[in-house]
Image (cartoon, rainbow, N blue to C red):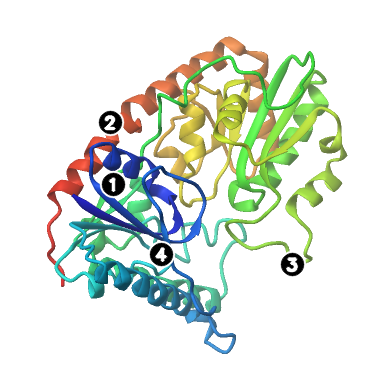
Amino acid sequence: MRILFVHKHFPGHYGHLVRALLSRGDEVAFVAERIDGEIAGVEPLCYLPHRAAAPGTHPYVQGIEAAVVAGQAAYRVMQGLARSGFRPDVVCAHAGFGPGLYVKDVFPGTAVLGHFEWFYRAEAADADFLDGPLTDDDRLRIRTRNAELLVELAGVDAATTPTRFQQAQFPDFLRSRLRVLHEGIDTDFYTPGADRPPADIGDADAVVTYATRGMEPYRGFPQAMAAFAEVLRSRPRVHLIVAGTDTVTYGRPRADGRSFREVAMEQNPILGGDRVHWVGHLDAARYRALLRCSAAHVYLTVPFVLSWSLLEAMACAAPIVASATAPVHDVMTDTGDGLLVNFFDAGALAEKVCDLVDNPRVARALGAAARLRVEETYALKRLLPQHLDLLSKIKPING
């Protein structure tokens, strides 16, 4: 088969699938805006949007305009592929940012599999979770933001979304178009083990951990830091390791220009002590070592896209304290394979972390159950064959 992947980032969500296709001898091409890694056998083709959304464009449609500009740039790169004689059997397109908008205009009659992560809502999801009811202006902007997603959904022949919660964000009449199929977690790599921590913890009694892409409210960074400060005060031989960068990936930065880490350390000076290790972005091996050494790993999220990091921590049998929010409920049950707390209750979070630190037998049992849950439901070895089967069966139904 010939498969074309279209994503804002290379390899994005498609790394495992690309490697599996290459290993069985399929031909793979990849179109992306940004290169974030390497896969032997694939030279991604980069598209470059010629401009950002114009400042004078109505704020409600600036996101759509940016997506269209990206779609135009990706269209031109795909035209070059077509002129070179490359005609894919299937195109896999990650929706939401524009590069997949015009796939059918370059390759009419080719089957397109779209991957849809999120449908924006003004109520009962991420938008109103942190700050309460939104303004009318916010509500209208959020509704309009879905226009690009709807255009892409209308143009694909099949569609996937990673979790039931993410599927449930879409309107009722569209949900049946979305097959719940997670990308999969490599449970042969993310396993329990006895690696050295990715920091010098000396003779600490235990390590608690937190890992994030950006240190932001969407992933509960302020609440986690307040809880960790209390843990450090009450458990003087516990160390904390925090992985991630001091950026905002989801949601809005602070209006005063300060970072959430800066504010957290000002509010809780103990976070600047020698028992706290800010290790930045970690490569896969050091990140796995962090998860393996954890006596209590914290994962918090607003009702939004579920991070792979929670499932990776579960696969490593890390004892986990997580937010009792809808995306977490999809994969974890309180006291069964983790401990769940109110997202906003830093005191309860600190208490649960201390419970795990103080009761390693309970912690190990929770971690083992979490590992089993991932192996049974989210293991790459189970899900990758389903992805490959879907690619072999998809047929073009849309022009």
The three-letter amino acid code for the residue at tag 1 is Val
* Residue 289 x/y as whole percent: 60, 25
Q: Residue at x 50, y 26 (%)?
A: 338
Q: Badge 1, how many Cα within 10 Å: few under 14, some, many 20+?
A: some
Q: Of the residues tagged 4 and 3, which is closer to the observer? A: 4
**Which of the numbered marks, if any, corresponds to residue 96?**
4
Callout 3–callout 1 Cβ contact below 8 Å? no
Q: Gap between marks 3 and 2, in whole Å?
A: 44 Å
Q: Where is residue 379 shown, x and y percent of the image?
A: 35, 30
Q: Amino acid at mark 3?
A: Ala
Q: Quadrant of the C terminus?
A: bottom left
174 vs 239, nearest the viewer = 239
Circle nearer the N terminus (4, 3)? 4
Q: Earlier in the sequence, mark 1 or mark 2?
A: 1
Q: Does residue 141 lie above or below 263 as drawn?
A: below
Q: Is residue 265 above or below residue 156?
A: above
Q: Which mark is residue 180?
A: 1
Please tell me whether mark 4 sits on a helix, a strand or a loop: loop
Mark seen at residue 255: 3
Residue 190 vs 145, above or below: the answer is: above
Give percent across and percent down for residue 71. Answer: 39, 73
Q: Which mark is residue 382?
A: 2
Q: Nearer the viewer, residue 210 or 288?
A: 288
* Amino acid at circle 2: Arg
Callout 2: SS: helix
Few, some or many C-alpha atoms within 10 Å of disc 3 (few <14, some 14-19, many ≥20)?
few
Instruction: Please identify, in this view, whether the residue under mark 1 or under mark 4 is nearer the observer.
Output: 4
Is 101 on the left-hand or right-hand side of 343? left
Amino acid of disc 4? Gly
